[in-house]
Image (cartoon, grey):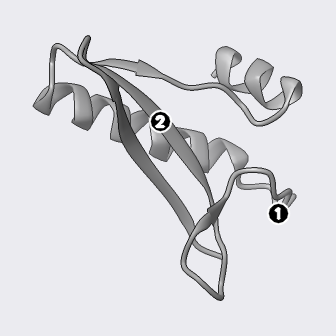
């Protein structure tokens, strides 16, 4: 399964929402609630963090907002 992530512009204060999840096979959309449980969560988070650094290099005034689709995921992201 392929992972996808994107930055969505939220408002005039340079706030962006970071969304990521697994790609749905039929439509190409992504699902941020799926649990693949294949042991690669650390690698996925490393990739997302690298994307955040790249995004901030390009848009240094941007604020990035991310929260998990569940409370447990939000705790995981805060720890990471």
Seen in the image, is 53 located left or right of residue 74? left
Residue at (84, 32) in percent of width and height: 70
- 54 with respect to 18 (left or right): left
At horizontal 15% and vertical 18% (from top left) the residue drawn is 60
Relative to 16, is 54 above or below?
below
What is the number of the mark on residue 38? 1
Q: Position of residue 58 (x, y in %)?
A: 12, 32
Coordinates of residue 31 in the picture (x, y in percent): 69, 60
Q: Residue at x 23, y 17 (%)?
A: 12
Lateral position of residue 22 relative to residue 69, left or right = left
Residue 80: x %, y % from top left? 63, 22
Q: Quadrant of the N terminus?
A: bottom right
Q: Are marks 1 and 2 in contact (CB under 8 Å)?
A: no
| Real-space Cα separation, disc 1 to disc 2, in angstroms | 22 Å
- What residue is shown with label 2? 18
Question: For residue 3, what is the image quadrant?
Answer: bottom right
Q: How crowded is the residue under tag 2: few (<14 C-alpha within 10 Å), some, or many (20+)?
A: some
- Does dot 1 land on a helix, a strand or a loop? loop
In terms of secondary structure, where does tag 2 sit? strand
């Amino acid at each position: 399964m392929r992972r996808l992530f994107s930055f969505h512009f939220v408002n005039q204060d340079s706030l962006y929402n970071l969304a990521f999840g697994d790609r749905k096979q039929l439509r190409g959309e992504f699902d941020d609630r799926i649990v693949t449980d294949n042991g690669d969560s650390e690698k996925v988070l490393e990739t997302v963090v690298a994307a955040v650094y790249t995004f901030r290099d390009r848009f240094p005034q941007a604020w990035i907002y991310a929260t998990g689709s569940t409370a447990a995921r939000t705790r995981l992201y805060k720890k990471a």
